[in-house]
Image (tube, rainbow, N blue to C red):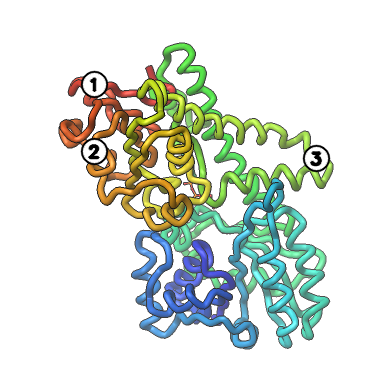
Amino acid sequence: MRITVFGTGYLGTTHAACMAELGHDVLGVDVDPAKLAKLEAGEVPFYEPGLEEVLQRNIASGRLRFTSSYEEAAEFGEAHFLGVGTPQKRGEFAADLIYVDSVIKTLAPLLTKPAVIFGKSTVPVGTAQRLGILARELAPAGDDVEIAWNPEFLREGFAVKDTLHPDRLVLGVDRDRPGRAEALARDVYAQLLDEEIPFLVTDLATAELVKASANAFLATKISFINAIAEVCEASGADVKILADAIGHDDRIGRKFLNAGIGFGGGCLPKDIRAFMARAGELGADQALTFLREVDNINMRRRTRMVELAREACGSLLGARVGVLGAAFKPDSDDVRDSPALNVAGQIQLQGAAVSVYDPKAMDNSRALFPTLSYSSSALEACEGADVVLLLTEWKEFRALKPADLDGVVRAKTLIDGRNCLDPEEWRAAGWIYRGLGRP
Ligand code: UDX
């Protein structure tokens, strides 16, 4: 099939490359010429394991191209996928839909033949219906333009696998205007459906809400264990063993029960806020007030980490702090709303000299937080440190041994913000080790 993908960020680039990998002819569309130039040269503008290979292979085969021309895209595509960002509005909880709206406003007037637009971006419930009305009004093809919603659940770091082998596919279609969307989606995802990946077809609102609810659930699960971590800290209990124990119950499950400095990234934080804002608009705000608490618990973990660092140093003024990790999670260079970078920034603002090292997120960190100092290795970041903070659980940091840092640091104190090291090993080597929610 001939497919276009609007937006070449984490989501759009992955979707475009993976659709080509499935054998479709794909045109990636973006308004940013710098991004397009990189992609055309076979370079992924962010770090995502395995994606560059898929991109290069499909560019070489001629199945994947990029353009800034909406005219070309409108002419080319049978199925148009919308994968632009929906960031948080400045100073508000709601999602900013300007990029989503702008794609429809630019694309629809160019649609002269029947077309289906599949939204993939995370949007407030009701958006797809509104965009459908807008697209049909603007398009010369009028009622032959359909909007469907096909939310994306990919995780950064596993984006290729999650796109080619997702847990499930969800498609929302306009129940009032039965059209070709489902049939087209079945063609696009034929290989995945052959693998018997569950395919749930529903109405537009349900599809939009599936995504919002999935992210709200995940955020809640993390904040739940982090709230329990606070009680563990107050009572001398160990949240890690507790999570293992409750995780053995199938109904609870061990995944997403890692206590630490909490969740961040370009999705969970802004998505739970947008969900609350939308529920408020719909008059259902009481239903989601618990998400405000989820957000508060999450933010408190960052403050707690700063407090622990201060306790360790006596005073942060003039202290040297080595920070391992800046990305919001390992295997990503994404620093959007990163708890790690946020903690590093707060500590620096309180007078400490902070040295940060991250295996992949250095450039993004420098751009967002130019005033922090950056080191070119974990050991360099820890040089002369009064305390070492492990804030993103990269494999390289999980593999650190106390002997690696002995003689490098000024004081053998380590605070493990991700509870990913073995306390016994570090304590046995003469270190003061502190985890979050652990004795
Ligand atoms: C998330 C959802 O998982 C994905 O389905 C959705 O499409 C987009 O948002 P992603 O942002 O890539 O994906 O990150 P995820 O792996 O969910 O992690 C989110 C944050 O939670 C990270 O900061 C991570 O460090 C933190 N986290 C995760 C914890 O603090 N504890 C855990 O147990 C798990």
Residue 3 higher or lower than 402, as above or below: below
Residue occupying image coordinates x 43% and y 48%? 371
Q: Which mark is residue 44?
A: none
**Amino acid on which disc 2 is placed:** Glu
Circle 1 sits on which residue? 427
Earlier residue among tags 3 and 1: 3
Mark 2 secondary-structure assignment: loop
Query: x, y (%) of residue 78?
Result: 62, 81
**Amino acid on which disc 3 is placed:** Ala
Q: Is residue 244 visible?
A: no
Q: Nearer the viewer, residue 222 or 300?
A: 300
Earlier residue among tags 3 and 2: 3
Mark 3–mark 2 Cα distance, whole angstroms, equals 52 Å
Q: Quadrant of residue 294?
A: top right
**Amino acid on which disc 1 is placed:** Arg
Crowding near pointer 2: few (<14 within 10 Å), some, many (20+)?
A: some
Direction front: furthest residue: 318
Mark 1–mark 2 Cα distance, whole angstroms, equals 20 Å
Q: Which mark is residue 284?
A: 3
Q: Quadrant of residue 97?
A: bottom right
Q: Is residue 414 visible?
A: yes
